[in-house]
Image (cartoon, rainbow, N blue to C red):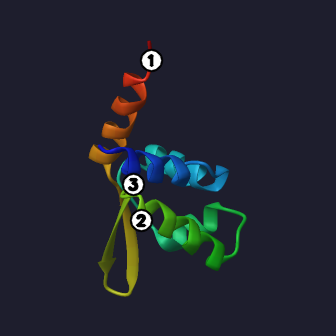
Amino acid sequence: MDNRKFEKISRALSDASRITILQHFKKKQGCLYCAEITDMLDLTQPSVSHHLKQLVDADLLIPEKEGRNLKYILNQKVLGDYIDRLNALKP
């Protein structure tokens, strides 16, 4: 993972709402639908869409169209690479 990718992920994770979204993926252990994410956050739908876009742009979430619905899957590989990079910063 290069420094630009690392920075992009760090910026995506710099918001409490985005951290909350990722925490719900851990509880759900699978995928979350856009409507589920909107229901669990006390935010408007456009705000949720903005946060999801930031996570998708950082490759932390993978969007998949399922009929008329959009579901998101946590990108375990990118998250794992990011965590490994953070751990490499330890002395």
Mark 3 or 2: in front is 2
Q: Are marks 1 and 2 in contact (CB under 8 Å)?
A: no
Q: Are marks 3 and 2 in contact (CB under 8 Å)?
A: no
> From the viewer's perspective, is residue 46 above or below residue 55?
below
Task: Give the left or right position of residue 17, taking residue 28 as reference.
Answer: right
Residue 67 point in image, percent of width and height: 31, 85
Residue denoted by label 2: 57
Query: Image quarter for residue 66?
Result: bottom left
Mark 1 or 2: in front is 1
Kind of residue sitting beneath label 3: Leu
Q: Residues within 10 Å of mark 3 (few under 14, many from 20)?
A: many
Kind of residue sitting beneath label 2: Asp
Residue 76 point in image, percent of width and height: 31, 45
Residue 78 point in image, percent of width and height: 31, 47
Q: Residues within 10 Å of mark 2 (few under 14, many from 20)?
A: some
Kind of residue sitting beneath label 1: Lys
Residue denoted by label 3: 60
Image point (32%, 45%), residue name? 2
- Nearer to us in this view, 83 or 71: 83
Image point (32%, 52%), residue name? 75
Residue denoted by label 1: 90
Task: Give the left or right position of residue 67, taking residue 26 as reference.
Answer: left
**Measured Cα–Cα span from mark 1 to mark 2:** 27 Å
- Quadrant containing the N terminus is top left
- Nearer to us in this view, 26 or 84: 84
> From the viewer's perspective, is residue 68 above or below residue 58?
below
Mark 3 or 1: in front is 1
User: Quick one: SS at disc 2?
Assistant: helix
Sequence-first tag of 1 and 2: 2
- Nearer to us in this view, 38 or 77: 77
